[in-house]
Image (spheres, rainbow, N blue to C red):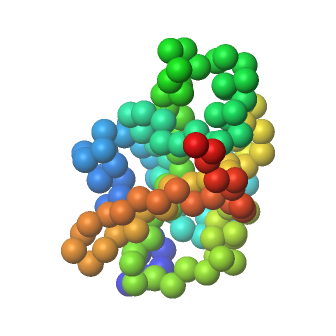
Amino acid sequence: MAEKDHGRQLADTVLDNLKYQHDWTELEILTHSPTDSEPFIRPLISGLPPRRLYVHPDDQIAMVKSSAIPDGKILDTPEVELVLPTHITEKWTLRKFAAVFDSLPAQPSTQPGRPKRIVLATIHGDSTIVYYLLHDGLVKPRQN
């Protein structure tokens, strides 16, 4: 199977899982950056989860300092996430992950620059899909 077909097949599988098992909406498979004609290394999935997946520790601190947390709860407004479909048998390197981040388009004006994280979807041989947050660079650990 060609790499292009393999990547598309993985993306289709993950998209179905996100839609039917995890209630994501606004799902689409992206093969090229909207601002560039260069194709992505691997098709990516763009979608909106039912609730926010992650709040960066710096953002949490800023919310606490500005009293922007109603009732002491972190805001749960979902934001569009990018998902990288992979298979457990593939060999990924830091260089390859960096190339994925380098190919990502800039975010809307609310989040300048390219995304700081993506969701890594790893499909196992038994069709189980495991999701991980993959950050671009180092991230400070959350303060308890």
Q: In this view, does 71 lie to the left or right of 37?
A: left
Q: How many labels sit on residues?
A: 0
Q: Quadrant of the N terminus?
A: bottom left
Question: Where 81 falls versus 39 (above or below)?
Answer: above
| Residue 63, x across and y down, in percent | 67, 26
Residue 129 position (above or below residue 87): above
Q: Which of 32 and 131 is in front in this view?
A: 131
68 or 115, nearer to the observer: 68
- Give above or below for 116 relative to 23: below
Outermost left residue: 126
Whether residue 105 is visible, yes or no, is no
Q: Is residue 10 left or right of residue 119?
A: left
- Which image quadrant is residue 51 in? top left
Assign the C terminus to one quadrant of the image: top right
* Residue drawn at 54 percent across, 35 percent down: 79
Q: Which residue lies furthest to the front in this view?
A: 144
In the rendered structure, the answer to whether residue 64 lies left or right of residue 91 reads right
What residue sits 55% from the left and 80% below the top? 92
Residue 35 at what x, y percent from top left? 72, 48
Q: Of 73 and 55, which appears nearest the observer?
A: 73
Q: Is residue 26 above or below residue 105?
A: above
Horizontal side of 110 relative to 86 (left or right) equals right
Residue 88 shows in the view: yes
What residue is rendered at 36% in x and 53% in y? 15
Residue 95 rendering spot, x and y as whole percentages = 69, 78
Q: Where is residue 64 in the image (x, y as percent from the top left)?
A: 66, 25
